[in-house]
Amino acid sequence: MPFDEDIPTSPLVSLLYRKQTSYLNQKLKDMDLSSGLYPLLVKTYRKGRISQEELAEEIHINESTVTRNLDKLEKKGLITKTPEKRKKIISVTDKGAKIAQKIMDYDEEWDDIIKKGLNDEEYENFKITLIKICEDLV
């Protein structure tokens, strides 16, 4: 179904977000993990160790949301929190690492889905443009 060329960007961004969330929630359903939790797990996995404050800053969500979601990940046995001076340092458990690796595979699968109608240059330009827009907003 074609879209009107004069459509504002917000419905398009919203549609893309909803489709990706639906895709990931379907993939993560067996792991009892929602799309709202996975960015924290993946970012922590990639960093190795990270403070709650740094995590909130890097993912661009408020600290209270990070705290709440990290508690959920900790209850599932996917992360550990270690007090260090005045900070809590977050690390991924072995179980969490396995799940983070699967999630990164699902992210690659999603990228393959959205690349289908684009050539390599169009996809790279799309990604660069999204990054520019997001950087300007935060």
Image: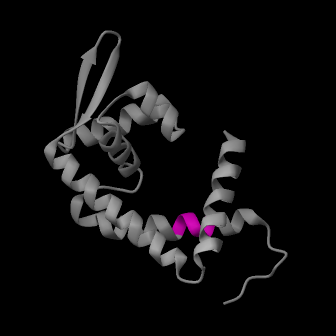
- Of 136 and 10, nearer the camera is 136
Q: Is residue 77 above or below residue 50?
A: below
110 left or right of 29 in image? right
The image quadrant where one finds the N terminus is bottom right
What residue is at 47 percent from the left and 77 percent from the top?
113
The residue positioned 14% from the left and 45% from the top of the image is: 94
Give the residue furthest to the front.
121
Verify whether residue 51 appears in magenta. no
x, y percentage for residue 136? 72, 43
Q: Residue furthest bottom?
A: 1
Task: In the displayed orientation, state which residue is furthest to the top.
Answer: 85
Task: Indicate how the structure is coloured in the image.
Answer: one colour
Count of numbered badges drawn on the protein: 0
Q: Along the horizontal axis of the image, is 98 left or right of 49?
A: left
Vertically, is 67 above or below 4? above
Q: Residue at x 53, y 82 (%)?
A: 116
Q: Quadrant of the C terminus?
A: top right
Q: Is residue 58 above or below residue 12?
A: above
Closest to the observer: 136 or 118? 118
Image point (28%, 52%), residue name:
100
Give residue 67's position: percent from left, percent from top: 38, 31
Query: Residue 75: x and y, percent?
Result: 20, 39
Q: Which residues are magenta?
A: 14-18
The quadrant in which residue 34 appears is bottom left
Give whichever of 109, 36 is nearer the camera.
Answer: 109
Q: Is residue 78 left or right of residue 61?
A: left
Q: Residue furthest left?
A: 94
Secondary structure mostly seen in magenta is: helix
